[in-house]
Amino acid sequence: MQIFLIRHPRPLIAAGVCYGRLDVAGEDPRGAAERLRPLLPAGIPVVSSPLQRAQRLAEALHPAPQIDARLAEIDFGEWEGRPWTEIDRSLLDAWAADLLDFTPPGGESVASLQARAVECAAALRGDAVALITHGGVMRALLGHWLQLPVDEWSALKFEFASVTLIELTAGRATLRYANR
């Protein structure tokens, strides 16, 4: 199976603000859709996060995308919408010390994010699918499929409105390209 992981367009929010699950709009998706469309197989099914910055791109790529809440970005709880500089430094340090299992107040852990994203991907059927999602979800999925330690996969970078292709064949994952 070919899985085209597509990150949403740049969100319309000030730099330095924690916005994980915050449902902020993204840049106009039409240009991104035109650029991405030739990279995708014709008629490919599209599954999207319900957050508008992803869903609008999905709608620009496909007339009837499927929406799956398991593809939403991590829930940062009480941190959402706050500048990173205003979040208690001791909490950020605790998160850095336990990237996988630390849970922000009122939010979810990276382990929870990864579990729901992997559950979503395991339910996919067919030869190819495009997932319109978020950087955190993409990192978590690639970390799982490529069996990377969390300190490696959590540092992966994905450009806004870019596509990364992974192929899953007989239980093996191959990263074909990233950030196109």
Image: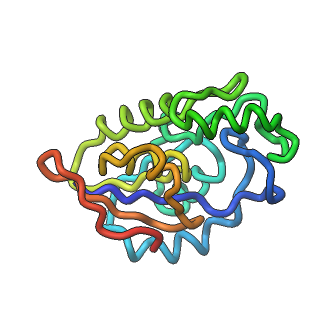
The single residue placed furthest to the top in the displayed view is 106
Total labels: the figure holds: 0
Q: Is residue 80 left or right of residue 50?
A: right
| Residue 132 vs residue 148, the one in the foreground | 148
Residue 28 appears at what percent x and percent y? Answer: 69, 66
| Residue 67 vs residue 168, the one in the foreground | 168
* Residue for point 62% across, 65% down: 29
* Residue for point 42% across, 57% down: 5
Residue 126 appears at what percent x and percent y? Answer: 22, 48
Residue 124 appears at what percent x and percent y? Answer: 30, 41
* Residue for point 54% across, 56% down: 59
Q: Is residue 153 above or below residue 180?
A: above
| Residue 176 vs residue 124, the one in the foreground | 176
Residue 164 appears at what percent x and percent y? Answer: 41, 64
Q: Is residue 161 above or below residue 150?
A: below
Q: Is residue 109 left or right of residue 105?
A: left
* Residue for point 73% across, 45% down: 19
